[in-house]
Amino acid sequence: MQRLEGSSNNGKLEGCDKIMRSLKLRNREDWKPTYDGGDEVEMNARLVRQKTGTLRCQRTVGLRTSWLYELIQEDQGRVVYWEMLGQVTTDTSMSGTTQNTTRTAAVASLSQLPQERNEPEKEAETLPSPPCSPSAVPPREGNTVVVTPVSASVSCFYLPQGAPVPRSTAVGQVIARIEATFANFKEQRATIHDMGKVSKACGCPLYWKAALFHGAGGETTGFISASSLVDTWNKLSLSCFDESSKFVYLLAKRGAAYLEQEDFTLLLQDIVDSHPGLTFLKDAPEFHSRYITTAIQRIFYTVNRSWTGRITASELRRSNFLQTLSLLEGEDDINQITDYFSYEHFYVIYCKFWELDTDHNLSIDRRDLARYNYHASSERIIERLFSGAVTRGTSAQREGRMSYAEFVWFLISEEDKRSPTSIEYWFRCMDLDGDGVLSMYELEHFYEEQHDRLEAMGFEPLPFHDLLCQMLDLVKPQQPGKITLRDLKRCGMAHVFFDTFFSLEKYLEHEQKDPFAIHKEVDRNGQELSDWDRFAAEEYDVLVAEDSESEHPDERPSEGDLECEQLEVALETGKKMEKLVKSELAA
């Protein structure tokens, strides 16, 4: 057993330095050797001396701390053995012995450590890790102990660009296909109309062609060459390892790691120009921008869960957007893809907006929005909509106007209050002070108007205290008297909660049926329809029926048509509510 030179701190630190070199941790910045307790000294890393003479090598990743080595010394500075430790997740304090760990020990004499050399050190690719058997100490042979080195890589927990993969021959094969495809083009240049073949050569879905065209610089020149695309693909392969990160890299602005609304314009214009389900739009170019705006707002409504106006690769991974985009290639009827791209959904949204926008300047004010669904929404919630609580621009606050893009968010949120974005949308509106909690004062503020309107229509409304008891039983908040966003998402009855406070017609519908009754409707694939899908399908049928009736005014529907009867009842209720609102405004 070889002693460390001297008994002072310098001698001990010199010995520790040798140990760190032997463990290949000397130049690793993320691993810090520490003495537990005692006096502090500096030598490439923080070393703290403790009476017990314990040296630990510590690495912290997030909130987890890995204690990999423990070197136990005698008081005179002589190294007895070093011990490998498991991970500590519950107790990462530096006191005494390590708790809640799985220990494995490997004993080594200082004489076995490699001698210092003047040649430069090479950084280790892997770090030693604990042997498999716990508490196993290798047998001693006199003063010599046999140590079996074990190596393992330290995993990374945050991979924003996807899990790295080794560069293989697949990249070379893609490049060869790209060059072969461009050889068939005139002057070996591809326009946006040629990008379908190029996209397939890259192994991408068909409607990635606009993203590839943009990523290779085609938007500025009107065409791309094989060399520009190959250069783009090489850079892409080195830094992006999954579809989401590749899509963001191709479509985003140079140097940006996120997608903004205008970044989707080229992609959606290409879909309008080339998808067989939208060929009829070629004769109506004035509707291209309306359809593109609607699709962009629907994308951000569903995908951009952070409400930042910037879609990241992480948000794309958690959404179904790229899968839905891939489905466009195999589906000629775009209305069968209800997420994001359905023309029928766009038709319903735009017609609803057109009815309210009387001057047709693509913006509406408070009075225009109040007329939606025959004044079903309360004046107080409309006031909050124009306060900037859920609108991104400043026009709603400064000019008192709501744009078409903002109306898309309103309509989807109004007709489907079960989705996460809709719950957040209305929670922001009701949270008057912005403290993240709906207080009893805020609930009473919105119910007061609802109470007065019910009385004016001849109904006997519940007193606020009784209604509050019902709502608390419905939501079951974790903190008494405080309703949070998490409470509303967890309870599954957020749509009933919101309608109770500011949507009169739907509140009356809920009062006439069991709110817990389960009635599911499914699409042709057996998937359950959302409230928005159901509403859009019904409204589209109504709009088509109105158009056909205007073309054939002599034809009348049969008396036994149940849907027409329900529509007449809804119209009568709406007219009654409209008269009520007009009388209130006159007063």
Image: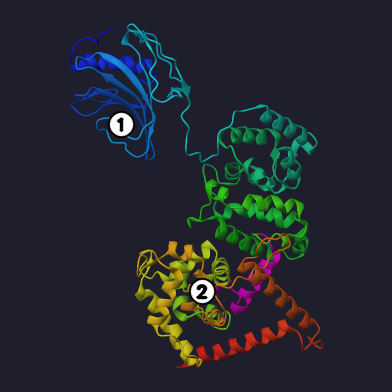
Magenta residue check for 461: no
Asked whether residue 343 is in view, the answer is yes
Q: Is residue 58 above or below residue 141?
A: below
Left or right position of 80 against 213:
left
The disc at residue 98 is 1
Residue at 72% from the left image edge and 53% from the top image edge: 328
Q: Name which residue type carries label 1.
A: Thr
Is residue 398 visible in the rendered image? The answer is no
For badge 2, the amino acid type reads Val
Quadrant of res 213: top right
Dot 2 falls on a residue whose secondary structure is: helix
Q: State the image coordinates of residue 210 (x, y, percent, origin top left).
A: 67, 48
> Which numbered mark, 1 or 2, is in the foreground of this view?
1
Disc 1 and disc 2: Cα gap in Å?
A: 53 Å
N-terminal of the pair, mark 1 or mark 2, is 1
| The one of 84 and 158 positioned closer to us in this rendering | 84
List x then y, in percent, for residue 262: 57, 55
Residue 12 placement, left or right of 488 = left
- Give the quadrant of residue 555: bottom right
Q: Quadrant of the C terminus?
A: bottom left
Quadrant of the image for the N terminus? top left
Query: Residue visible at 73% across and 44% down?
Result: 195
User: What mark, if any, has residue 496 been given in the picture?
Assistant: 2
How many tags in the picture? 2
Q: Position of residue 547 (x, y in %)?
A: 75, 79
- 363 magenta-colored: yes
Residue drawn at x 59%, y 28% as measured from the top left: 166
Give the magenta-colored segment's residue range.
Answer: 341-364
Residue pictured at 59% horizontal, 86% vertical: 574
Is 229 above or below relative to 56? below
